[in-house]
Amino acid sequence: MQIISSEFLVSNTEVAKCPNNYLPDYAFIGRSNVGKSSLINALCNKKSLAKTSSRPGKTQLINHFLINKSWHLVDLPGYGYARTSRNQKKIFQKFIILYFKERKQLVSAFVLIDIRHEPLPIDLDFMYWLGEKKIPFSIIFTKSDKLKSDKIKIQIENYFKKMSDQWNFFPNHFITSAKKKNGLENVLTYVEELNKLK
Ligand code: GDP
C-alpha cells in the first residue's frame, strides 16, 4: 500500500470525541523520543504531519489522521517516567488506557521500541497489559540505521528472549528506519492485509 492521502482530523483526550465514522484505527505508541513522529511522517511521506520532539510545546493528545480516506492512523502520546520525591513513577495517562479499553474501531496497536535499547520494564509492562486486555499489537523497532545488521539480529533475539519470561508466543515485529525509510512498506502492507479482513 502507498499512502496517497493523509490528513489531520482531530486531537483530543476523550475517546468519546474521537472520530465516529467506523473506519479502523491503528494506534502508534511508545516511549517519548522513540522516533514515533518521525516514523509517522516517513510512512505518510510528509515532513511534519506528526510533531517531532524538536518542536516545542508538544501536546499530549490522541491525534487522529485519515489515511487514504479509508483508515485512521492514531498518534498517541509518548509514555515515560516521572520523577517523584522517592522514586520514578510509570506514566500511562488515564486517557490512553481508556482509549485502548473503549475504542471499538481499534484494529491493532503498534508499540515502538528503539532498536538500540535493552528491553525496558515500561515497554514490557505496557505490552503485557495489552495482552491481558486482548488488544492486538505488533512491535515496530525504530532507528535501525543506527545499528549494523548483525547487531540488529542480536538485539531482536535478546528482546524476544526477555519477552519469553512473560509470553508463550511473540508478536509480529517490524524493523524500521524513518531516516533511511527502511521497513515502512512492510508496516503498510500489514495494515492493508488487516483492512482486507474487515
Ligand atoms: P518521538 O518523541 O517518539 O515522536 O520521536 P521523534 O520522531 O521526535 O524522534 C526523536 C529523535 O530521534 C529525533 O532526534 C529524531 O531525529 C531521531 N530519529 C527518529 N527516527 C530516527 C531514525 O529512523 N533514525 C535515526 N538515526 N534517528 C531517528
Image (cartoon, grey):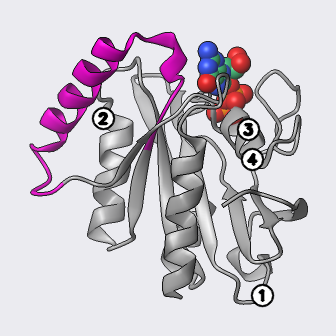
- Label 3, ligand 1: CB separation under 8 Å: yes
Say left or right for 186 vs 63: left
Instruction: Report the Cα–Cα distance between label 2 and label 4.
Output: 22 Å
Sequence order check, earlier mark of 4 and 1: 1
Say which of marks 3 and 1 sits in front. 3
Q: Nearer the viewer, residue 133 or 114?
A: 114
**Is residue 123 found inside the magenta-colored segment of the image?**
no
Mark 3 lies on residue: 42
**Tag 4 secondary structure:** loop
Sequence order check, earlier mark of 1 and 2: 1
Figure quadrant, ligand 1: top right
Mark 2 lies on residue: 121
- Label pair 4/1, CB-CB below 8 angstroms: no
- Label pair 2/4, CB-CB below 8 angstroms: no
- Taking the spot 78% from the left edge, 64% from the top edge, the residue there is 64
**Is residue 151 found inside the magenta-colored segment of the image?**
yes
Say which of marks 1 and 2 sits in front. 1
Instruction: Report the Cα–Cα distance between label 3 and label 4.
Output: 21 Å
